[in-house]
Amino acid sequence: MFWDPRIERMPEKELEEYQERKLKALIFRVYNHSPFYRKRLKEAGINPWDFSGLRDLTKLPFTKKQDLRDTYPTGMFSVPISQVVRFHASSGTTGKPTVVGYTANDIDMWVECLCRGLVSCGVSREDVVQISYGYGLFTGGLGFHYAAEKVGATVLPTSAGNTARQIELMKDLKTTVIACTPSYMLYLSEYAYKTGVDLKETNLKRGIFGAEPWSEETRKRIEEKTGIDAYDVYGTSELSGPLFTECTEKCGIHIWADHFLVEIIDPKTGEQVGEGEKGELVVTTLSKEALPLIRWRTGDITILENEKCACGRTHPRIMRILGRADDMIIVRGVNVFPSQIEHVLMQIPEVGEHYLIILDREENGLDVMTIQVELSEKAEIDKVSDILELEKRIAEKLKSVLNVTAKVEVVNPGTLQRFEGKAKRVIDRRKI
Amino acid sequence: MGEWVIKQLSVFVENKPGRLAAVTKILYDKKINIRAFTIAEAGDFGIIRMVVDRTEEAYSSLKNAGFTVTLTRVLGVEVADEPGGLYKIAKALGEEGINIEYVYAFTYGGDKALIILRVDDIEKAAEILEKEGVLYKNS
């Protein structure tokens, strides 16, 4: 099923010409309307009249999160506030929040992108869509809300939290699709199980999960536990909010190339990486009006796939987000992504889905990484050696994947902290 | 499964204050009596092993409370509470090449001792102990 078959199946050549035109127009637009970008472009020696389009893309300067902070609250906007119809803001974990603004066209484009995504993973007007992402300044709730309504589905705007009521409404109103973070879905399914609700017996058949990196194994676990199809969604508040999803093929997230131009770079050098190599996702917004972004450094690590998808969509895909360039853990000089650890743990049937990564620095200056993971209720344990062998087996597996030693501690089921929003799985106690 | 098999509960617990209380409270609330009890302790965690009067009920109560519980088949040996009681059976099993994985014991009734054994070959061990006339049987 397609929301906009003409655009979604547009031949690559046409799509590229389209991007070419829009990129040139974007450079003119920001040069004329954004003092921030006019200065930036001048500094980079770029004159819109000489800018030749896609060929010159790598000459354009990057835009970073720090730029939004430096120009807080609206210094990077390219339209007067009277044309802005909505603000969103992302939580400022390191200082001030970052504010994003939308014109009416921006909202339309955002909704349009997510409508394509929802339809591509099978959502239709027959569905009841429960939105358990937070509503408010966070873009997750409202983003899904508008798109699901536009698709014609029945929206159940539960927002985040109050799990008992989420499950009650899910049963009573026959929810067929849920949108939330993958860690909240695990929490919700565990809660349902404990209160005697088998999600397999409800009408729920699809879930659209994002806002934090998750693994293929977590997808399998969610699907096995709940009997639903789990799809990945991607977006950031700076780009609009949730924008891109997987299609029913489940092999990568379709990036709508008529509105967004993507590159993958080496986060250290800023150079584009070779095809199929992993790196930081960089996005140029081709259509956004209020807050256009040129070569926006998302901080998300992924791989780009330009091959046409089996579903018939020609737009490029990004693979699962492997982690954040900036929450990558460095243990004894080795780069470690929490998602790699999750990937290993999910392959071990004796342990549960919840885990905690603790980093300490010994007096001798060596980093020690401890992974706490819950024993599965199904594990067969009688001898002390059963646990010691399990811990050893996990540690060996981790070592082979991460190239760094981790100490594994198995803990009682249900004792690690649960998260209703984004999971905080790393505790760094190292004093640098 | 012979009527001589004792089903022992093994519960994984982290070595933290209150964990033993949590396990035993569940049994107390159900008025389940513990007949034999031991903890194999290993630093950060331990494994509680116990024989109770209502095994199935204890198993499901602990499981529902979120504990990892395993039912293990063990043997009971009933000997007189006097010197040489354990030696006699250890010798008999050793001579037949049976390995004892763990053992714990308690006395009851003033003159008897019940020894709980996990062995590598439960069927053969039961046969040997039966010959020795010490195998405990569920009445």
Image (cartoon, coloured by chain):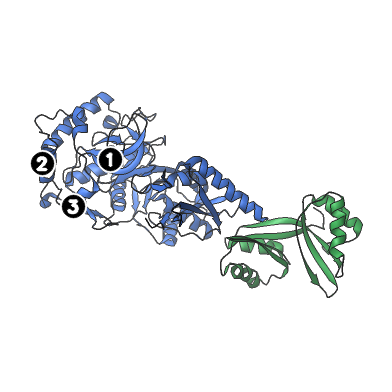
Chain colours: A blue, B green
For the residue pair A339 and A271, the one nearer the viewer reads as A271
Specify the quadrant of the image occupied by residue A4: top left
**Sequence order check: which comes first, mark 3 or mark 2?**
2
For label 1, the SS is helix
Kindly give the residue lying farthest to the bottom in the view shown.
B110
Q: In the image, is residue A307 above or below residue A427?
A: above
Task: Return the residue at label 2.
Answer: A38
Q: Quadrant of the C terminus of chain A?
A: bottom left
**Sequence order check: which comes first, mark 3 or mark 1?**
3
Density class for disc 3 (Cα within 10 Å; few <14, some 14-19, many ≥20) is few
Q: In this view, does A128 lie to the left or right of A74?
A: right
Residue A70: numbered disc? 3
For residue A100, say whether it is visible. Answer: no
Q: Position of residue A54 (x, y in %)?
A: 20, 29
**Sequence order check: which comes first, mark 2 or mark 1?**
2
Q: In the image, is residue A213 above or below residue A94?
A: above
Q: Where is residue A140 in the image (x, y as percent from the top left)?
A: 31, 51
For residue A61, say whether it is visible. Answer: yes
What is the CA distance from the residue labelled 3 to the residue labelled 1? 29 Å
Residue A113: numbered disc? 1
Q: Do the residues labelled 3 and 2 touch (CB within 8 Å)?
A: no
Labels 3 and 1 share a subunit: yes
